[in-house]
Image (cartoon, grey):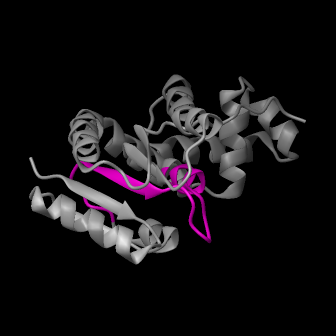
Amino acid sequence: MEHIVYVVDDDHSVRQALVSLLQAEDYQVADFSSAQTFLAHSFSPAPGCLILDMNMPEANGFDVTDALTKLGYLIPTIFLTGYGTIPLTVKAMKAGAYEFMTKPAVPRLLLQAVAEALKLAEKNLGASREMQTLTARYDSLTPREREVLQLAIGGLLNKQIATALGVSEITAKVHKRRVLEKMEVRSLTDLVRAAERLNIVKTQGR
């Protein structure tokens, strides 16, 4: 199975050193000088991992991993930082970092972390694709349909949803049906499961 290693670091010399190290091990590498260009590019369907500079001018590592999560990508991330502290390491691990290393990273240890992260990416591939699909479905909902979704998974009936939104019960039913269709689920139970995967908060009404 093919893999890809993403490298995001605004320091050109560091980035090129990482790319050379990885390519010497026959890894397919895609490197980026900023968080924006990385997040905006078309991601490969192949399982991959990310080597990410923790401190960049326009965004820190946590901003990038948060954005990836919102996009539905489950990419094991190896954080690199010029100055590691215990609190920062703990925060990174809580944020889902696969590994946290200080610069300059020891090549042997970095390559070992990459190999292990790619194995995890293979296991996560199915879940990652499912999250991307769910995220795309949710993004297709209108603001009103998202309100209806939150109210529906909060346990409100059509009449209660209508009252909460100030619309007729028929309109509420139409919105709810469209939500089920766009999310491609057959029942409220399936909708609740999908919402849980997306960490959508329930709304109990006004």
Q: Where is residue 183 shown, x and y percent of the image?
A: 48, 44
The image quarter in which residue 20 lies: bottom left
Residue 147 position, x and y percent, is 73, 45
Left or right side of 104 for 117 = left
User: In x, y percent, where is residue 33?
Assistant: 43, 74
Taking the spot 56% from the left edge, 66% from the top edge, the residue there is 56
Looking at the image, residue 89 sits to the left or right of residue 146; the answer is: left
The quadrant of the rendering that contains the C terminus is top right
Task: Determine the residue positioned at 20% across, 41% down.
Answer: 115
Q: Is residue 22 above or below residue 1?
A: below
Write the start and end of the magenta stretch as one range: 43-68
- Residue sitting at x 36%, y 74%: 13
Identify which residue is drawn at 68% across, 32% down.
152
191 and 115: which is toward the camera: 115
Residue 50 drawn in magenta: yes
User: Is residue 45 shown to the viewer in this render?
Assistant: no
Residue 16 in view in this figure: yes
Q: How many marks?
A: 0
Residue 49 rendering spot, x and y as whole percentages: 31, 49
Image quadrant assignment for residue 87 = top right
Query: Compared with residue 200, is residue 103 higher up or lower down, i.e. above or below?
Result: below
Nearest to the observer: residue 87 or residue 185: 87
**Would you place residue 160 above or below residue 134 in this image?**
above
> Is 27 placed above or below 94 here?
below
* Nearest the eye: 104 or 54: 104
Q: Is residue 97 magenta?
A: no
Name the residue nearer the viewer: 102 or 203: 102
